[in-house]
Amino acid sequence: MLNDYLSEVRDIVSCNIRDLIGNSNLIEEAMNYSALADSKMIRAGLIFASSEINQYLNINSKITLATSLELIHTYSLIHDDLPSMDDDNFRRGKKANHIVYGEANAILAGDALQSLAFEIIANDSDLNSSDKVQAINLLTKAIGKNGMVYGQHLDIESEKRRVSQNEIEDIHMLKTGLLIECSIMFGQIGNQNKEELDLLRIFGKNIGLAFQIIDDLLETTSDKETLGKNIDSDKKNNKSTYVKIIGAESANKRANELKEHAISQLQNVRSDKVSLLIDLAKYITTRKN
Amino acid sequence: MLNDYLSEVRDIVSCNIRDLIGNSNLIEEAMNYSALADSKMIRAGLIFASSEINQYLNINSKITLATSLELIHTYSLIHDDLPSMDDDNFRRGKKANHIVYGEANAILAGDALQSLAFEIIANDSDLNSSDKVQAINLLTKAIGKNGMVYGQHLDIESEKRRVSQNEIEDIHMLKTGLLIECSIMFGQIGNQNKEELDLLRIFGKNIGLAFQIIDDLLETTSDKETLGKNIDSDKKNNKSTYVKIIGAESANKRANELKEHAISQLQNVRSDKVSLLIDLAKYITTRKN
């Protein structure tokens, strides 16, 4: 049931990405290569699921916002994989972008994906201007110098030194959590109920952190084919991972606590449509890839 | 007179950048390093000068829009200087960003500058939502996969092959011209007079191309200290430049034609405040650095 839902969202968003980017030059080709690569598009799924709660967004705007977040996520993966960053040559089941298109074009494709994410929000034909500005506000706060980009910087810096559990939670929150929280908030564009928004923000924050902890776990227990990326990457870079710091069992326990805390927020959200978010929270903590 | 004007704009925008970025982590430091480096901030000057024509923007919004464009310009310089791109180690009179902060942080600082450019427009307290969306629309069209980023890709691709005058004009227009055109249009946010906007767009397009032709000329006739960047960079990369293709004299003549064509547009703009734009067009084609 949830898999069908995610699969449907992925198909819609992929189709939109294909229409948007075209294939008329090498930069577009490089953008498509990574944006259309095999991905579960969890963030897109979260936006759709979040918007089910109160249905402020119409289908076109959902697609726009989901596409925007997936473009940002793709840009971050392309840049993170670069030799000067995590130096990964395999991603989403195929060669990393810079392996195929070269470093210069990979950097440029990432840069263009970032601006495209803002462009499509600004160009959406159904959102009103105030909603667009709200979405761009949420997105820039999640990804900038005090968000995702800073998380990636800290992540690289954490190589070859001991970090505490608190520190790694901060890094995970910045690097991954904020964009997942943003997915939940994107689904709420148009909602003015501050109390409900706060509950959903806490839900997003907690599943965001849980998501990254499970990522760390899968890096140590899964294989390259299942994950679609190199599993020895963190080890190679000597990165601190959640598992390395507190062990696999405690990491799993922590992810489950976060999931439960997330789900408990939804008890106070007055909607009979929260079941998809609950299913997604459970999926995030039990996923195998 | 014009120098005083540009200098005042530069001081105001630099002050805003300093307030905006802070200095609380290494990414912010790297962003500041390049954004506050010695720069004429021509694009900021163009926004202010363009807005003088009809005064739709208040001073705060001018500062926001000018800062946004300068952040984008700075991000593009940081990424262009990277070893995998133009491999330049000197910029704005000092070491390139990646020489000081390393490649990973330079890429991340550029990424964060891009998102900050959108963030400050979305957060401006005086522009209305519709104006903000219009500005973000203009900006994304100028810098993305069919704009500046594509221009940088073509610029790199043009190394080691012969390109025609038409081709290099296209590259210059994409890589540099569109952002200068965008500066002129940013100064017109709020103006609904389509005819006037068209004239000013042509003005911007022509001075944008002239600007880059003069850049090519200065690369062959100036020195590193005056320009604040390596003058042998294009030669080292074996890049096609305007001067190489049609010679210095013809290049100069072409820049002057473009300037005259630009200025002629302003005859049909009903405002007694076009003199600053005329001065800027002349400055762009006679500048020494």
Image: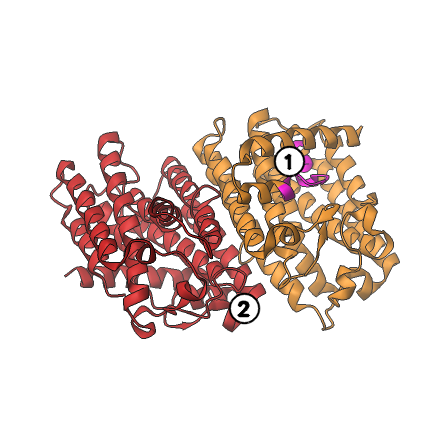
Chain colours: A red, B orange
Q: Are marks 2 and 1 in contact (CB under 8 Å)?
A: no
Task: Report the residue at 88% width, 57% height from top.
Answer: B249
Q: Which of the two marks, 2 or 1, is nearer to us in this view? A: 2
Q: Position of residue A195 (x, y in %)?
A: 23, 31
Q: Residue furthest left?
A: A272
Question: Mark 2 falls on what kind of element?
Answer: helix
Residue B187 placement, left or right of A158:
right
Residue A126 placement, left or right of B208:
left
- Does the stretch in magenta take in B34? yes
Q: Which residue is mark 2?
A: A26
Q: Residue furthest front?
A: A162
Q: From where the camera sits, is residue B236 visible?
A: yes
Frontmost residue, A197 versus A82: A82
Q: Amino acid at mark 2?
A: Leu
Q: Are marks 2 and 1 on the same chain?
A: no
Question: Mark 1 falls on what kind of element?
Answer: helix
Up-down: is A167 above or below A225? above
Q: Which residue is mark 1?
A: B47
Around disc 1, counting alpha carbons within 10 Å, would you say few (fewer than 14), some (14 to 19), or many (20 or more)?
Answer: many
Which segment is the magenta one? B33-48
Q: Amino acid at mark 1?
A: Ile
Around disc 2, counting alpha carbons within 10 Å, would you say few (fewer than 14), some (14 to 19), or many (20 or more)?
Answer: some
Check the residue under mark 1 and report the chain it is in: B
Task: Report the residue at 66% width, 45% height from top.
Answer: B180
Up-down: is B32 above or below B60? below
- Does the stretch in magenta take in B39? yes
Quadrant containing the C terminus of chain A in the rendered view: bottom left
